[in-house]
Image: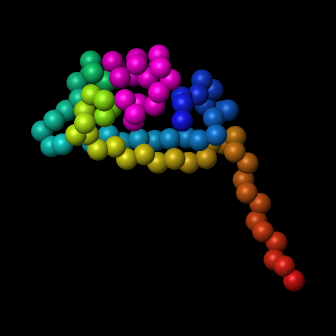
Amino acid sequence: MKVSKDENAAPFHTTSMIQMPEGNTISREMLEKIFAESNETKTLIRHLVPKYFSEAKIVTAVSPEKSVPEMKKRTKRE
């Protein structure tokens, strides 16, 4: 999965939560570095965080974007 330039044309929407072990934090400078690398390489942030913080826990929710049509309900066979 790659980062899309146009969110409206993307087939999926992802939301990630990053949790560091108790007592550890991610500095603002490191977050800015990860965001910049993500923009340059078009790699998702959730794939870059373990590169710098192997102990981080990442949970990601994937949902269809608005551009994906709704599925039609099946008709009942008789």
Please give left or right for residue 20 compared with residue 76 in the image: left
Q: Quadrant of residue 11?
A: top right
**Vertical placement of residue 75 versus 15, above or below:** below
- As drawn, the residue found furthest toward the bottom would be 78
4 relative position to 71: left or right: left
Q: Residue 50: horizontal and vertical position, in percent? A: 31, 34
Does the magenta run of residues contain 42? Answer: yes
- At horizontal 51% and vertical 47% (from top left) the residue drawn is 62
- The vertical placement of 23 against 51, above or below, is below
Image quadrant occupied by the N terminus: top right
Q: Residue at x 33, y 18 (%)?
A: 33
Query: Residue 68: percent from the left, percent from the top?
Result: 69, 45
Nearest the viewer among 30 and 51 is 51
- For this orientation, the residue located farthest to the left is 23
Q: Residue 34: name its quadrant.
A: top left
Magenta stretch prevailing secondary structure: helix
Kindly identify the residue that appears in the image at 50 percent across and 23 percent down: 42
Q: Quadrant of the C terminus?
A: bottom right
Whether residue 23 sits left or right of residue 33 in the image: it is: left
Is 2 magenta? The answer is: no
Q: How many marks?
A: 0
Picture coordinates of residue 16 (x, y %)?
41, 41
37 or 67, which lies in front? 37
* 8, above or below 36, in the image: below
Residue 30 in which image quadrant: top left
Q: Residue at x 40, y 19 (%)?
A: 37
Residue 45 at x, y percent in the picture = 41, 30
Question: Which span of residues is magenta-colored?
Answer: 32-48
Is 22 drawn above or below residue 40 in the view shown? below
Query: In the rendered view, how is the structure colored?
Result: rainbow
